[in-house]
């Protein structure tokens, strides 16, 4: 198991090394300047996102955004941050934030393009990069590759990993049986996913504000209670972004090359987790954007991109509280353990609120990815397979609850903390690997459409966004 994990992490390190960093950073910077710094519209777009928009679509623009935020501001923004810190040091948080700022422009482009070229199918509006690749680029094979990547990511990161995250925090906090949690989550999720996009959007509209508000409050409480350690934590985050984890590992005589390699590792982890937590560059959020009622693809694109803002805020808070706690240097602490050690500093309510927040985060992510996988299934196999996907998805969810005790590949895992962390790390590694099959085709599509996207944006913004 450990050898297999090492192999997958090496492959991810290669893929998400300098080439991918350059591709994502480069495209984000390119679109930022090409579109006249579209990020400046973020605040107005946040205000617009809560208003009713008249236009064609299946759900309200806020419902679409809530579903999108629910899928993005999930455990990737909390446990994804902690895993990045554990593997690459606090500097990974710095690169997550920097990548997130430029990823706003990427998120806008992929959502705008998807809405512009969406189609009406079975009395609902559907779309996404796979439809753009087919209708505009005339590259069906690339669209199929992307859709397969969506299915794989939905299975691993959307269903199994989210169920495991909920089971993990409840096992950690209350010693509950992971298998029972997995089946309970699957049963509850099935009552929502069976209703399709309208029911998912409806639940997301009231769950997302609750989960976000509670987490923000408790995270700020941790920071306030440890305010004297805040300057040091911020300094560690910034310094280790350029020197790597090696400098803070207590090693004596660390070579310059080791520090550089460690810094690049943290940068790669930060960029990959930024893509995973914001979904900017993956193209998945564009699938949700296509369901929205909107009168303009450009308008919905900018509204959709505001989900990156919320994700970056959550990532910053998660990174700061974990760094303040200091357990990121403990090799046996991973994922939920790191979060728990930080939130335990708030007496009585810290751990319960963290657990509740993680459960809601995971659940909304699970719902969002159910819809993404459903639309990928519909694109690949037709509408008749949608019901099969819904059943399969919740079954994977049920099995995912016991990921820490018996991993789905048939590898027997003992229930001690180290092995549970090992299987969780393996699941995260697989999620990053499958994310690659979405990200590369999507980035290629955006590059091919760069001139059309810029022209469309400038024409619309000249009139008025609002």
Image (cartoon, rainbow, N blue to C red):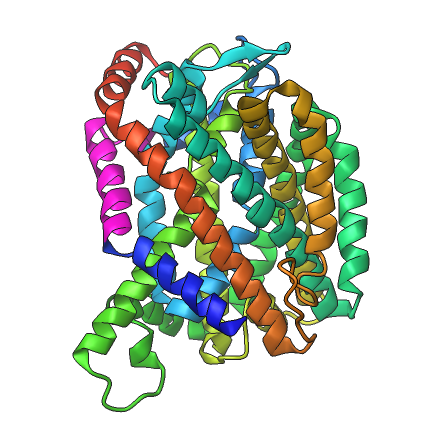
Q: Camera-side residue: 233 or 281? A: 281
Image height check: is 80 above or below 278?
Answer: below
Tell me which residue sits at (54%, 79%) in the image: 332
Question: Is residue 457 rendered to the left or right of residue 228?
Answer: left
Is residue 11 toward the left or the right of residue 35 in the image? Answer: right
199 sits left or right of 133 in the view: right
Residue 360: give x, y in percent of width and height. 67, 48
Quarter where residue 218 is shown: bottom right
From which residue to which does the magenta span run?
19-41
**Relative image position of residue 460 (x, y in whole percent):** 31, 12
Q: Is residue 431 above or below residue 106?
A: below
Above or below 219: residue 109: above
* Residue 149 included in the magenta stretch of the image: no
x, y (%) of residue 260? 21, 71
Residue that sits furthest to the left in the current view: 256
Residue 142 appears in the picture as rendered: yes
| Residue nearest the viewer, comparing 308 with 210 | 308
**Is residue 62 among what the camera can see?**
no
Quarter where residue 264 is shown: bottom left
Residue at 24% across, 77% down: 258
Residue appearing at x 37%, y 16% in the figure: 465
55 or 433, which is in the foreground? 433
């Amino acid at each position: 198991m450990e050898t297999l994990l090492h192999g997958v992490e090496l492959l991810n390190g290669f893929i998400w090394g300098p080439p991918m960093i350059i591709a994502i950073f480069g495209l984000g910077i390119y679109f930022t300047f090409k579109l006249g710094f579209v990020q400046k519209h973020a605040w107005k777009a946040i205000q617009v996102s809560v208003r009713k928009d008249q236009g064609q679509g299946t759900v309200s623009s806020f419902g679409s955004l809530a579903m999108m935020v629910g899928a993005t501001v999930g455990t990737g923004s909390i446990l994804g941050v902690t895993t990045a810190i554990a593997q690459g040091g606090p500097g990974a948080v710095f690169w997550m934030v920097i990548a997130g700022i430029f990823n706003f422009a990427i998120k806008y482009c992929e959502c705008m393009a998807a809405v512009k070229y969406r189609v009406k199918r079975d009395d609902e509006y559907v779309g996404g990069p796979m439809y753009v690749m087919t209708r505009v680029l005339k590259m069906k094979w690339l669209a199929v590759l992307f859709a397969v990547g969506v299915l794989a990511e939905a299975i691993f990161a959307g269903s199994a990993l989210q169920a495991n995250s909920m089971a993990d925090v409840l096992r950690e906090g209350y010693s509950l049986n992971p298998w029972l949690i997995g089946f309970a989550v699957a049963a509850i999720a099935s009552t929502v996913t069976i209703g399709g996009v309208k029911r998912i959007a409806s639940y997301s509209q009231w769950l997302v504000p609750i989960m976000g508000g509670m987490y923000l409050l408790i995270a700020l409480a941790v920071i306030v209670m440890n305010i004297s350690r805040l300057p040091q934590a911020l300094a560690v985050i910034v310094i280790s972004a350029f020197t790597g984890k090696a400098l803070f590992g207590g090693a004596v005589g660390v070579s310059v090359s080791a520090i550089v390699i460690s810094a690049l590792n943290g940068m790669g982890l930060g960029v990959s987790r930024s893509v995973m937590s914001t979904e900017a560059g993956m193209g998945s959020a564009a699938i949700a954007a296509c369901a929205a009622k909107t009168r303009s693809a450009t308008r919905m694109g900018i509204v959709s991109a505001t989900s990156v803002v919320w994700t970056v805020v959550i990532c910053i808070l998660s990174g700061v509280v974990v760094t303040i706690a200091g357990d990121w240097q403990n090799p046996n602490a991973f994922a939920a353990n790191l979060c728990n050690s930080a939130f335990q500093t708030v007496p009585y309510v810290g751990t319960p609120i963290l657990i509740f927040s993680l459960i809601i985060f995971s659940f909304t992510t699970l719902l969002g990815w159910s819809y993404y996988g459903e639309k990928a299934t519909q694109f690949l196999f037709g509408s008749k397979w949608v019901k099969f996907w819904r059943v399969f998805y919740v079954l994977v969810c049920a099995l995912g609850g016991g990921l820490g005790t018996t991993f789905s590949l048939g590898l027997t895992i003992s229930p001690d903390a180290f092995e549970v962390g090992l299987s969780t790390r393996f699941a995260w590694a697989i999620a990053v690997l499958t994310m690659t099959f979405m990200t590369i085709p999507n980035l290629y599509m955006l590059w091919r459409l760069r001139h059309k996207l810029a022209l469309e944006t400038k024409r619309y913004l000249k009139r008025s966004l609002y």
